Amino acid sequence: MTVLIAQNTKDKIILGADTGLFMDNHKFHCSNHQMQQKIAQVNDVVFSSTGSYSEQVNFALFCQTRKPERSDQLGIQRFFIDFGKWLKEQNIEPNGKVDNHYFLVFEKKLFHYRSGAVQEVLENDFATDGAGFKESYMAMHLGKSVKEAIDLTVQMNVWTSGEAQIVEILKQQKAPPAVPDDYETITV
């Protein structure tokens, strides 16, 4: 169980998750296990996932050798369809069904995959997912930051736990510092 938040601002995309990991009757904290982070970057794809941890690991493997063909809603939809086919080919999921929900950032665009469909999260908007989606949505709606919303959700929802994991993706590269007008250029 988890809580995921994705926010698309003018300058950056922010992904947030709690660090609790529930497996059978055990509860772990991802912050103690570097390989079990809920937000990951593999090649050009940054993603967070809620649902089966084994599917998330297999999605990371899939992303090691592939990336979406386009950074629009249909390109990301095809990427998840291809992931389902890959799961079936690898005999991981006999029906090729992708069960997890994902936030995916590709080419500085934010997408939300859930229940078999992709939706783009546009600038100045946010989305939440996981067991704590209601609490986190309320906190974000009330103007809290992604970190504050994760922290509040962990306090209110028994199926979330741990500290907030936050990843920020800047949309624009920082411009090089301007050269002062009184600066003299010397060619060597």
Image: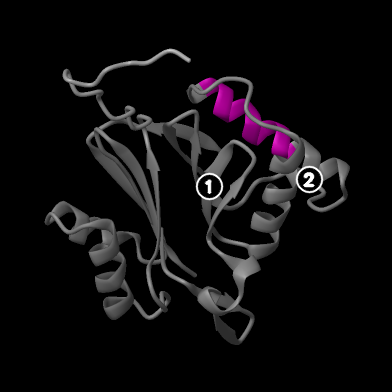
Q: How is the image coloured?
A: one colour
Which residue in the rendered view is the most extreme toward the left?
142
Q: Which mark is residue 55?
A: none
* Disc 1: CA contacts within 10 A as few (<14), some (14-19) or many (>=20): many
Q: Return the residue at label 1.
A: 47
Which is nearer the eye, 37 or 131?
37
Which is nearer the eye, 60 or 51?
60
User: Range of the magenta residues?
Assistant: 74-84
Amino acid type, label 2: Leu
> Vertical placement of 70 versus 27: above or below?
above
Q: Secondary structure at mark 1?
A: strand
The verdict on residue 76 being magenta is yes
Q: Horizontal placement of 96 versus 8: left or right?
A: right
Q: CA distance from mark 2 to mark 1?
A: 18 Å
Q: Secondary structure at mark 2?
A: helix
Q: Position of residue 185 (x, y in %)?
A: 33, 16
Q: Position of residue 124 (x, y in %)?
A: 22, 35
> Vertical placement of 156 versus 126: above or below?
below
* Disc 2: CA contacts within 10 A as few (<14), some (14-19) or many (>=20): many
Q: Return the residue at label 2.
A: 87
User: Quadrant of residue 176 in the image?
Assistant: top left
Amino acid type, label 1: Phe
Number of labels in the image equals: 2
Residue at 63% across, 26% down: 78
Residue at 27% across, 77% down: 156
Residue at 23% across, 66% down: 148
